[in-house]
Amino acid sequence: MFKALRARGQALYDKWHSPKPIEDTGALLSPTRLGQLRLQQLETLPESVLQAFAPDPLAWQDPRFVGRELALAALEKVVAQWREGNGRLAVLVGPPGCGLTSTLNQLREQAERVSYLSLPHRPCSHADVMRLLQSVFSLDTAPTSTSAAIELINNLPPSIILLDDGHMLLARKMGNGAALQTLGAVLLATQERHCWVLACAKQAWRRLCFMYGCHRLFVHVVEIEYFTEPELTQSVEARLYGLGYQWQVRVGLKEGERDPLAPYFSLLHDHAEGHPQLGYFLLLQALIVEEQGQLLALEDIPRLDVAGLKSCADDELFSLAEIYAHGGLHKVEHETLFRLAPDQSLVRLEQLRQLGLLVRDQSNYRLAPLMAQATVQHLVNANRLY
């Protein structure tokens, strides 16, 4: 009897204190308009708000770094074990845009020398690996052989090596497998002297494991995913903290009452599917700032229009899948991979770019960051990823 009365009382309390449900009436945003909408945000929103949600990776001890505490603790444990003489290779794995670089950056300040390198090229020869090692350790000249490299590196002072953009290790070129064997031999032979931590996109890591057995080399595999709803909420709150703004719907909120913003954050997480930068973009698109009163409000939260993905032909989907797996492809790499004439390759890449699915940097193409999650999900549903 008492339990039934208490349950009924809780139901009545929830009814009167829960925020009213909000309807999902947000607009559909065309991928081709995202760049234009970003410019509009830059023109209309306060600089402090824009800076708070800037897409750049977060630096060491940035207070906006939240939601990755477990992954960071696992990496710090790897470093601690290395200091105790039990050094083993570690890899940080996650989907594009989940915060791999930001997490890696939290290891940038240590008692030992820390070397950070974003892998600039895909190694396809022994010489490529030697030049990579030259860059990592700031050597005057590249080692002449694998044994010489191992001996030289093991005689250097202990250091922590952070290798970012591990997808660059993957290449569909002759010599890539041999180059990775050389690099793997060096890493294994020097892992007790130096602490190696690699950050790699999830699909590229799967390919590296499937094709070259990289999972046999890296003992520690730390995985992160896109934000959960509480993590995305915490991240938004952390980025707004200290700016002097207050949410209008929270004005006068009494202790114990349900947060009226909770349904909005739930809808935001649903529309962004946990993707941090997409979540921030959609939030800024719906955000209303009343600067005089330092108040914030939200209009209907929009979502992406993914109709363009459904119109892609099979060959275009395969191109998107390979660009995703490799973290990007040069137009020549795309030609070679699909055995296309230069003009055929360029037409396909440019058509995908015109749909807003790819971005181009000179002759390099990669998934449009804000469309990456939707694109990958469509590729998975279409069985175009392996």
Image (spheres, rainbow, N blue to C red):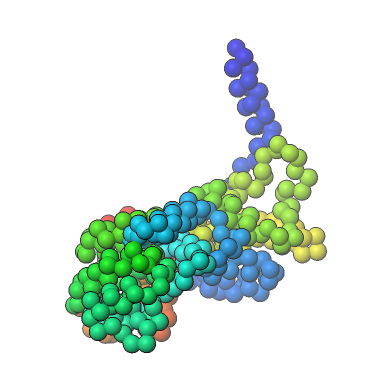
Residue at x 63% of width, y 55% of height: 237
Q: Is residue 328 above or below residue 266?
A: below
Indicate left or right for 16 with 159 as reference. Answer: right
Screen quadrant of the C terminus = bottom left
Which percent across, then down, holds residue 335? 25, 80
Residue at x 67% of width, y 45% of height: 260
Indicate left or right for 24 with 178 as reference. Answer: right
Which percent across, then down, holds residue 287? 65, 60
Residue at x 65% of width, y 32% of height: 15
Q: Nearer the viewer, residue 325 or 130?
A: 130
**Total residue callouts:** 0
Which percent across, then down, holds residue 280? 57, 61
Q: Is residue 112 above or below residue 174?
A: above
Residue at x 25% of width, y 84% of height: 144
Q: Nearer the viewer, residue 46 or 200?
A: 200
Which percent across, then down, holds residue 165? 39, 70
Outermost top residue:
1
Judge whether residue 208 can be spotted in this image. yes
Judge whether residue 209 can be spotted in this image. no
Screen quadrant of the N terminus = top right
Outermost right residue:
292
Q: Nearer the viewer, residue 137 or 15?
A: 137
